Image (cartoon, rainbow, N blue to C red):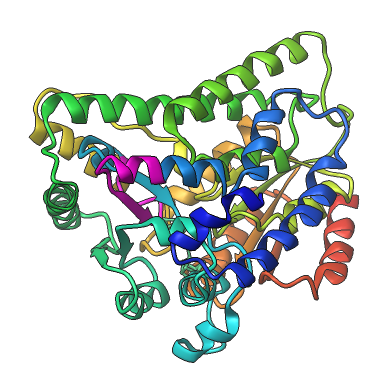
Amino acid sequence: SNNYNDMWRSLGVNLEAHDQLLQALPPTYHDVYLTQTNRPKSMEYFDFVVNEIHGLRIQELQEHKKNGGKVIGAFCVFVPEEIVRAAGGICIGLCSGIDIGAAEAEQVLPRSICPLIKSFMGFKLAKVCPYFESCDMVVGETTCDGKKKAFEILNDYVPVHVMETPQMKKSRDKQLWLEEVQDFAELAQKTTGTEITDVSLAQAIQEVNGKRQALRRLSNLRKNNPVPISGKDSLLIEQIAMYDDVARFTAKVNELCDELEQKISTGAGVFPGRTPRVIVTGTPMAIPNWKVPHIIETSGAVIVAEEMCTGLRYFENEVAEADGLDSMLENIAARYLGINCAVFTPNTGRLEQLENLVRDYHADGVIHCTLSFCDPYAVEANRVEKMMKQKEIPFLKIETGYDQEDAGQLKTRVEAFIEML
Ligand code: BJ8
């Protein structure tokens, strides 16, 4: 990876801190991923992407920028990728899944804050992420208070545009969100200098729908027993979906699905057919946050679905195709407002979805994972728990951060839960 040093330096990346980050990744990745048995052969591509995490894709972004293209970063699945693409830009989901630059972040943020927020601030202040350093603009949202206020601070270091996500889903909220989407389309065009046309937006909608369809296809295959792919591998793919090249990624996921269908037809799987099946739900698990899934899948269970933004919330809905820019923007706004994030009140859609998922994926239990200090999900966990009790679905609630200090304790709790499934 030393070949990339010049590129990283030219981006302003702090090479020393960056080396530390890259050194932390390979052992973790090896222990969590490469020790799994029966992995599908098509996971090779996704292993390659992780291996090249700050290499090849960054090179592609730099190529794009050299040709006058823009890169736009996002922290939430509410930011409409279709619009960025229609304006000729590349949309990158910034990860924030590792405790890095915490000392720098704590200079501008309170110590007790969601690790995801601390992580993105730390990444920026410590200049360790070449994706972040490649961004011409970052798009924030007004989802939770922590993020909303942190974007004001982040704006000191990189231009940030904040989209106002509503807190309810009434007709006036829909109108507000539609206007936010329309404004964002204006801004995207101004930023890239490229006009959004009927043709470019229709194409972007199709491409991103194609990506979501491939992910849904993969997800549906996990309804089988035995499961053809681990939850950890599935999560990795869902994480990579946020920043990889759309066309290539879509093709690779479909290739993987072809292989899995083959496997299913022979009755083969990655875990024995009697393995307890678990659904995880809660806050997103950004790359490389594989902590809880690793604990679950090394404690005798398999994860069959993620009711999370790094999971189903990212791909369960698509944008309806339409003629004319106005209708397309309306359909985009409608699709995104369908996301069941805990910042909405009420958020009954999430509860209904969870109940359906338990049935459709033949789950034996649900594990609710909240990042520490995340009020929306930690409080909403009560609604989820109440519903699970009513439906007599085994339920476990976990709250944890990015450090490994509580890993042993978590494993004990998870094992006890799985044992009773
Ligand atoms: S649509 S889940 S990606 S906001 S974990 S920063 S909520 S304190 S991430 Fe999210 Fe969009 Fe919703 Fe999805 Fe705040 Fe909670 Fe931290 Fe969070």
Task: Give percent across and percent down for residue 321.
Answer: 23, 24
Q: Residue at x 88, y 33 (%)?
A: 37
- Vertical side of 340 occupied by 401: above or below: below
Can residue 320 be seen?
Answer: no
Q: Is residue 169 found inside the magenta-colored segment of the image? A: no
Q: In this view, does 284 lie to the left or right of 1?
A: left
- Vertical side of 115 occupied by 259: above or below: above
Q: Which residue is drawn at 52% across and 76% down?
A: 126
- Vertical side of 254 occupied by 285: above or below: below
Query: Closer to the camera, 396 or 375?
Result: 375
Task: Give percent across and percent down for residue 2.
Answer: 65, 52
Q: Is residue 79 found inside the magenta-colored segment of the image? A: yes
Task: Give percent across and percent down for residue 272.
Answer: 89, 29
Q: Which residue is drawn at 58% across and 86% down?
A: 103
Query: Closer to the camera, 183 or 331?
Result: 183
- Vertical side of 234 occupied by 65: above or below: below
Query: Closer to the camera, 121 or 337?
Result: 121
Q: In which quarter of the image is residue 141?
A: bottom left
Q: Give the range drawn in magenta.
A: 62-81
Q: Residue at x 69, y 64 (%)?
A: 397
Q: In which quarter of the image is residue 157?
A: bottom left
Q: How many labels does the image show?
A: 0
Q: In this view, does 146 lie to the left or right of 23?
A: left
Can residue 181 be seen?
Answer: yes
Q: Is residue 70 left or right of residue 409?
A: left
Task: Give percent across and percent down for residue 368.
Answer: 65, 58
